[in-house]
Amino acid sequence: MQSTAKRALLGVAISLIVVGAVMGGIWNTVFDNILKSQLELKNDSKSFTLWKETPIPMYIEFYMFSVINPDDVVKNKAKPILMEMGPYVFRQKLALECGFQLKLNDDFHGIEVSYYCGPSEKHTKVNITWNVNQTITFNQIRRYHYLPEKSNGSLDDKVTNLNTMSLVVSSMAKQFPGSLVSLLNIFLKKEGSVFITKTVRELLFDGYNDKIIEWLLKLEHGLHLHFNIPFDKFGWFYMRNNSWSYDGVFNMLTGTGSIAHLGKMHSWNYYTKVPYYDGHCADVNGTAGELWPPNENGEAITMFVSDLCRSISLDYQEDSSVYGVTGRKFTGHREVVGNGTEYPDNKCFTRGTTYPSGVFDVSACKFGAPAYMSFPNFYLADPYYAQQVVGMKPDKDKHEFQITLEPRTGIPLSVSGRLQLNLHLHPEERVTLYESVPDVFMPMLWFSENAAVTEDLADEIKVLLIVPIAGTGIFFGMLGLGAFLLLIFILITLRGNWKGTEGSHLMGNGKEAS
């Protein structure tokens, strides 16, 4: 019995030491490999289920700018006085929310993942194709539902601002022959205007009939001209609601082979370089904005924004907590809206006139409209822009573009994508209606697209992040217990306190049993 007991105690001690030391040393690596297999986008992976129909509630807030002195602007070149209206809040269509629960297998060889579903909003991917080059091709559908209880105002509120189609066609006049410019002036004298008043619903998703669009379509058909007008009404987001084609065709990496490539764009609308910009500015890079690879140390992140036909980069600012989960907060800095003089790498975003930092040209992406994007209220812009109008109140808390990512998983904890659309009103000597207007970058609207993990989902992320810590603690606890038993074995062996006869104590006090 003495020999058996000694072998048993020694065997248990050594086993605990070996398993504890080995697994304690490699557990983080094992966990990371398991996690990567769960994050990788595959047809049968749970991450694919979450990505296909985004479970995180997503809202978009629209703020409209209305000009309260339009006649004075046209007749006297007065500074436009703007009134900010809104927010007009929308969410995406009600669907199913899928969450995950994690459980460590009894044999420590993997993690079991279970899912549940309940009501929430969704952002749906369709026309999905898996490609042999470890990419996935898809379209996405955005469904918007108005929330009057969260809004300040009604969709029937009236907004006065620039007549977009009138301004667009006047900008196009640079390429028109003289005879067509004469026709344009006759037409605009009858149907055109510098300013127009429409309801919020017409300006956003419903659209409105416009005589200028009808005229251009007739010219296309009658004179065999090509204006490439893809719509029959005008509205900033007309035809987008419930459309699978509006945002374009996305092709992105699945993370197979390298989790660092998870969610990164390979092409958009079959372009790896878009035709709207030059040089490296035309590159389609960064993520599509929903799937992010783990990012524990990176100082910047990049995302491709289809509405802008370009990528933008955000810089690390600070750590931030969302429902107790710590993430790395990335924000849009001045370089996003900087010109090529101040930031030479941005020079290839500009094909025409270089303006002060604060806006960037998206006219080529918007069918030739003189459209420029900025941060809301010209936040981080050169004072040149805010001084052209009355009513701008830039505020970091309200107008900053920010994304907070959990570093180990890349899960977005909080997103506030904030941008402002501006039109460049300027004199056009060939067009009578615009020959005497002021030169001003006119804010039209700004929006904030918001998403944040729910408290329940944050709790699940906490569990996920505790697994590597708990696993390491368990295994090193096993190592400590094994060392303790080994120490007992050594002490008893040195004292000779092992007894092996029948009826004796295994660990006695050195005397025979009476």
Image (spheres, helix red, strand yellow):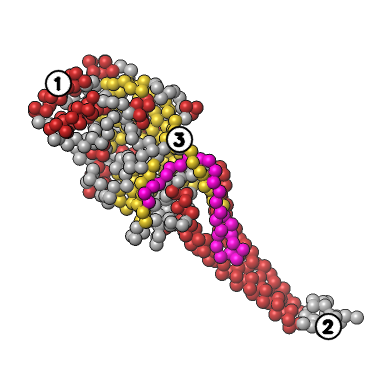
Residue in front for this viewpoint, 488 or 190? 190
The alpha-carbon separation of the residues under discs 1 and 3 comes to 43 Å
Three-letter amino acid code at the position of disc 3: Arg
| Mark found first going from the N terminus, 3 or 2 | 3
| Mark found first going from the N terminus, 1 or 3 | 3
- Mark 3 highlights which residue? 91
Residue shown at 56% from the left, 48% from the top? 116
Residue 133 in the image, given as x and y percentages of width and height: 33, 60
Residue shown at 47% from the left, 56% from the top? 45
> Dot 3: what SS?
strand
Which region of the structure is painted magenta? 102-128
| In this view, 77 is above or below 417 | above
Residue shown at 14% from the left, 21% from the top? 186
Residue 311 occupies which quadrant of the picture?
A: top left
Question: Is residue 116 inside the magenta stretch?
Answer: yes
Q: Callout 3 environment at 10 Å: few (<14), some (14 to 19), or many (20+)?
A: many
- Mark 2 highlights which residue? 502
